[in-house]
Image (cartoon, rainbow, N blue to C red):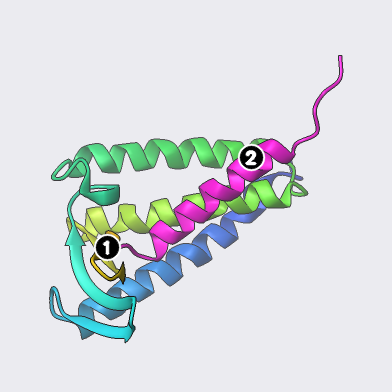
């Protein structure tokens, strides 16, 4: 077994997962469904349930979304295994995606829905409510794209 691999970064994915599910349980235990607390003129904590994926697409497709999350998670763990531990930015990006995917997967399996609570709006414009797992996934994807452009080009 390759010892100098990126699986070391699974620890970071676990931290992301723990922060995500802790925040969601806090919301469930302290808010009623649709209850909202305005923190800034453009930002509120609002408890909603999402039975779909991003922006509520695939609504009601719980099994399909769970299977998709598991497949993506296996692919990411394989990528971490193949990476060197020293590929810090790429491994960080993969662990953010993995931790977020596990957070939302846990919700789908445990609750039957994903807990969303971060609510952003400017005037009449309202962004779909999201959670920490969603933030980690988006940040991870952005960082992964950045890493793909940053890799040195191979010369023939």
Left or right of residue 91: residue 24: left
Q: Is residue 71 in view from this perspective?
A: yes
Q: Position of residue 113 (x, y in %)?
A: 19, 57
Q: In the image, which residues are magenta?
A: 130-156
Which residue is under mark 2?
81
Vertical placement of 151 versus 113: above or below? above
Foreground residue, 129 or 70?
129
Magenta span dominant secondary structure: helix
Q: Element type at marker 1?
A: strand
> Which circle marks residue 139 in the picture?
none
Vertical placement of 84 versus 131: above or below? above
Q: CA distance from mark 1 to mark 2?
A: 42 Å
1 or 2: tag closer to the N-terminus: 2
Q: Residue at x 33, y 37 (%)?
A: 68
Q: Residue at x 86, y 14 (%)?
A: 156
Q: Quadrant of the N terminus?
A: top right
Q: Residue furthest right?
A: 156
Which residue is under mark 1?
125
Q: Residue at x 71, y 44 (%)?
A: 5
Q: Position of residue 69 (x, y in %)?
A: 36, 42
Dot 1: within a 10 Å radius of its alpha carbon, few (fewer than 14), some, or many (20 or more) residues? few
Q: Position of residue 147 (x, y in %)?
A: 67, 43
Q: Residue at x 45, y 42 (%)?
A: 73
Q: What is the tally of numbered marks visible in this picture? A: 2
């Amino acid at each position: 077994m390759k010892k100098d691999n990126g699986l070391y970064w699974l620890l970071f994915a676990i931290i992301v997962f723990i922060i995500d599910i802790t925040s969601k349980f806090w919301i469930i235990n302290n808010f009623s469904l649709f209850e909202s607390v305005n923190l800034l003129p453009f930002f509120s904590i609002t408890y909603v349930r999402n039975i779909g994926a991003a922006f509520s697409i695939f609504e009601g497709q719980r099994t399909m979304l769970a299977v998709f999350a598991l497949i993506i998670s296996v692919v990411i763990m394989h990528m971490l295994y193949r990476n060197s531990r020293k590929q810090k930015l790429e491994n960080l990006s993969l662990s953010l995606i993995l931790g977020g995917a596990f957070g939302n997967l846990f919700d789908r399996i445990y609750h039957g829905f994903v807990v969303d609570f971060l609510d952003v709006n400017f005037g009449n414009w309202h962004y779909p409510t999201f959670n920490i797992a969603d933030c980690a996934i988006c940040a991870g994807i952005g960082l992964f794209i950045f890493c793909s452009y940053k890799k040195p080009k191979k010369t023939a």
